[in-house]
Image (cartoon, helix red, strand yellow):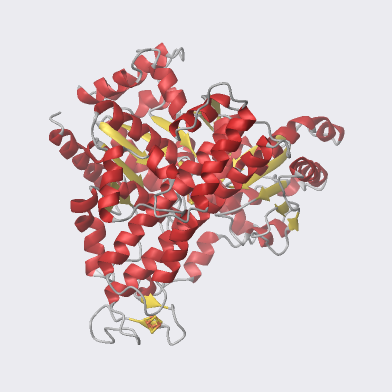
């Protein structure tokens, strides 16, 4: 057993219960995998053709080339490109569904209202579409048209979602490198082709292709998905609720939404409210919905639904014995959930044709029958409540108060209380005068190789103490929420003196009567696009390249291929992007050098790998200070 599995007291408590209940968890399986393969860890194993598998001896004593002649550099670079393309594919697929939903909604074919006309107009204007006197559904269809043209672009021109939304200076850099994506599907297909046997053998070319996948992800995945979802469900505004498994309630039907795409979870939240009398009829006080992973973040941001927990503790949620139903859609769902749910009364429900788990009930979710599916799922949860075994229930009493919902629009809204004409000015002024040293975005996952949440929390403590403002998304946001860093008290406790002054001033002006939280929750992983929008706006306001801003990114505990593709996008934006877990690239000196240094010359950003939280925080601060100096600050 690992010495510490987590720093989250609820997870630690439930891990003990899991042991007692004889439940195998991710930590047990991790232990059984030890020692993990050294070739794989270094990225030196190739299975791209059936002459293989081939592996390169990192110590130079065995084979130096694969059977086809591929070197370590080629094998590592190809593997990385495939991983990043896979991450991008996940986000683009997500975005595509959201575009489809907006189209059907605008045509009145499904029961999803268009919730945010202002966002629709803003996106349309950004795309150069005339908005004057157009009905929302007409305008929405024009926006959808542009998205579909990007998805099916057969020209050489770049995607309009990129050219319309990316900072101008960046577009020039990307164009000069030949990495502007034309059509996300085409680029992902090309990456698969480029990495098959007998194709690209130039590590530099492969790394540039990887950077292109970062842009596919950033604009064809993240930005497109968030824009569509905001139009459909509303742009988030500040909400207050709680985080951690203590949000489950013994006397309520507990329904957990887990996965990523809000098309389903929004409907669940709505029907959980509507069908609450049915829960009361079976003796419960109502239906408590709580979220895991990014589904959790999505419904938190827009509906104020509490967060249950992040990636690494998803199994432990079921171990509470109090989860009546866990409904999942796509991504980051451990296949083990089926087995664990069978040890309790929990009904695990899968909903998507590409995610089925033996032992789970499959209720197909389609946009056309979304309401029926959501009702059926909520009713299943109510029925399962009656089967709950009180002897197996243990809900750890840990919850932290959180304020979330910090879309760019919400941040600008709060800042405009200080300066209505130039809302970004107060933020920029405080960066210029050094009250805020810089901004770090912490994003991404938990990874079983790191005690759950420890890297997020310890690194962010150090950043805040040094007056760095932190914005967070994904499972990083969950970690910081659970640790009490997303409320006003967190500002008192963790923020350095000058950062506290700024947070207090904004909080007071925004009518909170208390400081703004020191870590701003900006949403799910696709909502990293919000961070992109914020830095794009800041760079535009200052008239500088995003690469020049005193801003950095970090994925302290990355596990998913999506985290690699998001990180790659951050690098293409010109940011130093920290990873707290070593990605499988060390088998190639050349690729490692390109990613951590060589790329900087051409793209401005780089990866920075550091496995100690304090050192990482100071590495990022040092990077920010260099950028400040270059700006004359
Ligand atoms: O998309 S942070 S573990 S849940 S991949 Fe997955 Fe990573 Fe969590 Fe959100 Ni993002
Ligand atoms: Fe081996 Fe080359 Fe085939 Fe990879 S592509 S498995 S290195 S022969």
User: Left or right of 519: which side holds 72?
Assistant: left
| Image height of 445 relative to 103, above or below | below
Q: Residue at x 79, y 41 (%)?
A: 375
All told, the count of numbered labels is 0
Q: Residue at x 25, y 20 (%)?
A: 429
| Image height of 438 relative to 63, above or below | above
Residue 299 figure quarter: top right
The quarter of the image holding the C terminus is: top left
Residue 193 visible in image: yes
Residue 285 visible in image: no
The front one of 475 and 355 is 355
Q: Position of residue 286 (x, y in %)?
A: 76, 31
Q: Position of residue 393 (x, y in %)?
A: 70, 45
User: Left or right of 624: which side holds 78?
Assistant: right
Q: Position of residue 604 (x, y in %)?
A: 22, 47
The front one of 109 and 154 is 154
| Image height of 347 relative to 41, above or below | above
The front one of 523 and 309 is 523
The front one of 458 and 431 is 431
Q: Position of residue 344 (x, y in %)?
A: 72, 54
């Amino acid at each position: 057993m690992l010495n510490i599995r987590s720093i989250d007291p609820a997870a630690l408590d439930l891990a003990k219960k899991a042991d007692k209940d004889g439940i195998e968890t991710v930590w047990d399986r991790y232990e059984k995998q030890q020692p993990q393969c050294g070739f794989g860890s270094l990225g030196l194993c190739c299975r791209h053709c059936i002459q293989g598998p081939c592996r390169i001896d990192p110590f130079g004593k065995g084979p130096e080339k694969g059977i086809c002649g591929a070197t370590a550099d080629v094998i590592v670079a190809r593997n990385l490109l495939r991983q990043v393309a896979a991450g991008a594919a996940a986000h683009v697929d997500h975005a595509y569904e959201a575009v489809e939903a907006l189209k059907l909604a605008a045509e009145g074919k499904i029961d999803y209202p268009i919730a945010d006309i202002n966002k629709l107009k803003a996106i349309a204007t950004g795309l150069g579409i005339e908005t004057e006197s157009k009905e929302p559904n007409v305008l929405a269809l024009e926006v959808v048209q542009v998205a579909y043209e990007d998805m099916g672009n057969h020209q050489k021109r770049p995607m309009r979602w990129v050219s319309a939304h990316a900072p101008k200076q960046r577009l020039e850099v990307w164009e000069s490198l030949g990495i502007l994506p034309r059509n996300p599907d085409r680029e992902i297909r090309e990456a698969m082709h480029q990495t098959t046997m007998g194709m690209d053998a130039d590590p530099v070319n492969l790394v540039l292709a990887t950077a292109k996948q970062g842009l596919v992800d950033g604009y064809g995945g993240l930005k497109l998905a968030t824009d569509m979802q905001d139009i459909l469900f509303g742009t988030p505004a500040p909400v207050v609720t709680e985080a951690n498994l203590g949000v489950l309630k013994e006397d309520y039907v507990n329904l957990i939404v887990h996965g990523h795409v809000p098309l389903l979870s929004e409907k669940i939240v709505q029907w959980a409210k509507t069908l609450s009398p049915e829960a009361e009829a079976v003796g419960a006080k109502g239906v408590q919905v709580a979220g895991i992973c990014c589904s959790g973040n999505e419904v938190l941001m827009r509906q104020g639904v509490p967060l249950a927990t992040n990636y690494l503790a998803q199994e432990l949620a079921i171990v509470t014995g109090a989860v009546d139903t866990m409904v999942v859609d796509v991504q980051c769902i451990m296949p083990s959930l089926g087995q664990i749910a069978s040890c309790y009364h929990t009904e695990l429900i899968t909903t998507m044709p590409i995610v089925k788990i033996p032992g789970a009930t499959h209720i197909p979710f389609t946009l056309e029958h979304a309401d029926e599916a959501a009702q059926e799922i909520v009713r299943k949860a109510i029925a399962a409540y009656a089967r709950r075994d009180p002897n197996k229930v243990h809900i750890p009493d840990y919850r932290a108060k959180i304020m979330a919902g910090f879309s760019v629009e919400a941040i600008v809204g709060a800042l405009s209380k200080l300066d209505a004409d130039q809302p970004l000015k107060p933020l920029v002024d405080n960066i210029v005068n050094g009250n805020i040293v810089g901004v770090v975005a912490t994003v991404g996952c938990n990874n079983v190789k790191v005690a759950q949440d420890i890297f997020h929390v310890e690194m962010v403590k150090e950043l805040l103490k040094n007056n760095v403002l932190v914005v967070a998304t994904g499972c990083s946001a969950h970690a910081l929420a659970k640790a009490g860093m997303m409320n006003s008290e967190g500002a008192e406790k963790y923020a350095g003196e000058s950062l506290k002054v700024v947070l207090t001033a904004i909080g007071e002006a925004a009518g909170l009567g208390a400081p703004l939280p020191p870590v701003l929750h900006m949403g799910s992983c696709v909502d990293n696009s919000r961070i992109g929008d914020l830095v794009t706006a800041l760079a535009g306001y200052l008239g500088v390249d995003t690469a020049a801003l005193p801003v950095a990114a970090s994925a302290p505990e990355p596990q998913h291929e999506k985290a690699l593709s998001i990180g790659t996008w951050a690098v293409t934006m010109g940011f130093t992007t920290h990873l707290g877990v070593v990605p499988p690239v060390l088998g190639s000196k050349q690729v490692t050098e390109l990613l951590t240094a060589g790329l900087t010359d051409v793209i401005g950003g780089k990866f920075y790998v550091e496995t100690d939280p304090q050192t990482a925080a100071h590495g990022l601060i040092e990077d920010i200070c260099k950028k400040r100096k270059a700006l004359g600050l």
